[in-house]
Image (cartoon, coloured by chain):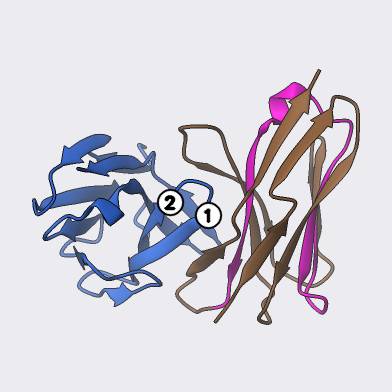
Chain colours: A brown, B blue
């Protein structure tokens, strides 16, 4: 059974600071996804990582994938309040592209 | 192009009542999914479909049934609702390596 673990579950950080969210998973996969969810809203796709060593960046967010370590990271650079949200990683190990989600990291960026 | 839409947005049921949630997508995607999201948790897969006329069980299928009679629609049914089914339900459709999520249905079972 695939397990996906994120840490931390809660993160409070000041504007301008850097931090990293970690996503570990238990079964070999080379397809990992990061989503953002605002309160009461749906999921917004941030990154799709499809191979070992994949790195993608968008604005202040950068995601990477190490399939050998079964680890993905979401790095936040110089955080701003608008980044406050819950971030989920999800792993896909099937041909039907079923996603198994982590529990999410609730990020609060303080002024 | 509306993407993935869900009907209804909110619903309150009494224990034992039945209802059907409708998911529609206009992107001609083959794969469709139903997930539920409970407070403080990630999404969990209920059922999915890899094409018209096909369905399969996901991680938490008990108490739910689905149908995919048309490619663009994926229905989720609750035959006899229970308080444990209080949740937010998300539908998604997929092409290649990306899933597109609907806005969600917030269901409360009293």
Q: Which mark is drawn over residue B37?
A: 2
The reply to whether callout 1 and callout 2 are in contact (CB within 8 Å) is yes
Is any part of residue A30 visible from this angle? yes
Magenta span includes A6: no
- Image vertical order of residue B36 relative to residue B46, above or below: above
User: Camera-side residue: B94 or A15?
Assistant: A15
Q: Which residue is mark 1?
A: B42
Residue A27 position, x and y percent, is: 66, 81
Give residue B55's mark. none
Q: Quadrant of the N terminus of chain A?
A: bottom right
Relative image position of residue A96 (x, y in whole percent):
45, 74
Please state which of residues A103 and B24 is positioned toward the viewer in this rendering: A103
Tell me which corner region of the image, top left, top right, bottom left or bottom right, holds residue B1. Answer: top left
Kindly give the residue lying farthest to the left in the view shown.
B17
- Tell me what residue is drawn at x 47 percent, y 34 percent: A41
The kind of secondary structure element at disc 1 is loop
Mark 2: give few (<14), some (14-19) or many (20+) Cα within 10 Å.
Answer: some
What is the chain letter for disc 1? B
Magenta range: A64-93
Decide: few, some or many residues near mark 1? Use Cα within 10 Å; few <14, some 14-19, many ≥20. many
Q: Nearer the viewer, residue A29 or B70?
A: A29
* Chain designation of label 2: B
Left or right: where does residue B108 sit relative to residue A45?
left
Q: What residue is at 53 percent from the left and 54 percent from the top? A: B42
Magenta residue check for A76? yes
- x%, y% of residue A106? 66, 41
Give the mark nearer the N terminus: 1 vs 2. Answer: 2
> Residue at position x 8%, y 51% from top?
B17
Residue B72, image quadrant? bottom left
């Amino acid at each position: 059974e695939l397990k996906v673990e994120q840490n931390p579950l809660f993160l409070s950080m000041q504007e301008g600071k850097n931090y990293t969210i970690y996503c570990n998973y238990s079964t070999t996969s080379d397809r990992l996804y990061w989503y953002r969810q605002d309160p009461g809203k749906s999921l917004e796709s941030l990154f799709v990582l499809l191979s070992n060593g994949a790195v993608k960046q968008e604005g202040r967010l950068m995601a990477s994938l190490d399939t050998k370590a079964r680890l993905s990271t979401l790095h936040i650079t110089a955080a701003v309040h608008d980044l406050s949200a819950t971030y989920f990683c999800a792993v896909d190990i099937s041909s039907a592209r079923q996603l198994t989600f982590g529990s999410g990291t609730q990020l609060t960026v303080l002024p | 192009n509306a993407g993935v839409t869900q009907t209804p947005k909110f619903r309150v049921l009494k224990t034992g009542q039945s209802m059907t949630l409708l998911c529609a997508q206009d992107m001609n995607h083959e794969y469709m999914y139903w997930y539920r999201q409970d407070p403080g948790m990630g999404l969990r897969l209920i059922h999915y479909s890899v094409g018209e006329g096909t369905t399969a069980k996901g991680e938490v299928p008990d108490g739910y049934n689905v149908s995919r009679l048309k490619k663009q629609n994926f229905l989720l049914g609750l035959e006899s609702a229970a308080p444990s089914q209080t949740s937010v339900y998300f539908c998604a459709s997929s092409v290649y390596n990306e899933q597109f999520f609907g806005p969600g249905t917030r269901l409360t079972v009293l």
